[in-house]
Amino acid sequence: MVKLKDIAERAGVSMATVSRVLKNDIHFSVTESTKEKIIEIAEELGYERRGEEEREVVIALPKGSVGVFLLYNEELEIADNYYQIIRVNIKNELSKAGFVVREIFLNMLGSYINHIENFQGIILVGHMGILAKTKELLTVIREQKIPAVCADFELENEDVMADCVVNDFEAVVAKALQRFWDNDYEEIGYAGTYGIQIHGRLRGDKRYLGFKKLMEKRGTFKEEYLWLANNNRIQDGYEVGKKMLHQKRKLPRAILAENDSVAIGLMKALKEGNISVPKDIALIGCNDIPASAFVAPPLTTVKLSDELIGQMSARMLIERIITGREGGIKIVVPDRLVIRDSCGTKSKL
């Protein structure tokens, strides 16, 4: 009878390594070449699991590739590292589990749509607006019934039973507004984007929708305190700030920005207009990008769980591949308010 010791001696590895490879232990890190060598030797020697090993529940993780479809171009990661952090954490988790990861940016999408069946599963990173424009991708996912996870957005298509890992943006906005209200700020504005096009209809960004809902509930929402742009980069925030000053009308006591990039650009424009942050206008962003702690004044922001979104997206896909689960699951990740100087305090009014 062939024993683990026989395989270990032939492969030049420990018995523990042989045991964990033959059990398809997804938490065990070993090179693909070593794994293949062990399996080949076991098959050559006619190894069969016996005794105690036969009673163990073995989860077989098939080898293969995972496609990470990035619904944006690389320039976006340069402007804001939010999606980069998600992407890197997805790749790290999948690689640790032994998968080969293929990252596909938006400009490469067309070359891969007809080859999705070569992947064991896919993860979509970005937002629904871009995905809605690539109907062919959705069609292929549905027809191939390939395991899929959406990272940072929820799939609005009941025919595709994908998992999703998302932020609760209404909760994010609520934390920021509560900080303003605690400081006795009632006149609060919003700076961000118009939203995204989904199936020909404009959908407001969830942060804006949450802001509008909560401010209306409080009875303090004002259309004149909205400043919207086509994008949410630093330059867009700066241009929004210039537009705000050019209008020469009463400004709100505080502003919530869609993300930190918009807030940083807005802060620069306000300074150039001799408007002090937070003395004249308090400001809160969203994301907690590295630059937020180093601008003057340091930016108060809501920290999103970008690392966790990446990790959980990968783990859910692995679980789905292993179990064959068909129904989709939604996971909402936590967030937290990072208080710095830009939002002001009662004592500094």
Image: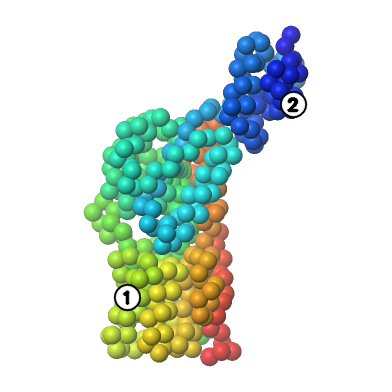
Foreground residue among 106 and 151:
106
* For residue 224, above or below residue 75: below
Residue at horizontal 62 percent and vertical 11 percent from the top? 44
Q: Position of residue 21 (x, y in %)?
A: 65, 26
Q: Do the residues labelled 2 and 1 touch (CB within 8 Å)?
A: no
Q: Which amino acid does label 2 sit on?
A: Ser
Residue at horizontal 43 percent and vertical 32 percent from the top? 119
Q: Which amino acid does label 1 sit on?
A: Glu
Q: Position of residue 84 (x, y in %)?
A: 47, 54
Q: Residues within 10 Å of mark 2 (few under 14, many from 20)?
A: few
When asked about the image quadrant of residue 45, the answer is top right
Quadrant location of the N terminus in the rendered image: top right
Residue at horizontal 59 percent and vertical 89 percent from the top? 347
Q: How far apart are marks 2 and 1 (CA)?
A: 63 Å
When asked about the image quadrant of residue 182, the answer is bottom right
How is the structure coloured here? rainbow
Question: Quick one: which residue is furthest to the left in this view?
Answer: 200
Which mark, residue 14?
Answer: 2
Foreground residue among 195 and 81:
81
Element type at marker 1? Answer: helix
Q: How crowded is mark 1: few (under 14 residues within 10 Å), some or many (20 or more)?
A: some
Q: Name the residue under label 1.
A: 239
Foreground residue among 208 and 131:
131
Residue at horizontal 30 percent and vertical 40 percent from the top? 110
* For residue 233, above or below residue 44: below
Q: Position of residue 132 (x, y in %)?
A: 30, 48
Element type at marker 2? Answer: loop
Q: Where is residue 307 in the image (x, y as percent from the top left)?
A: 55, 54
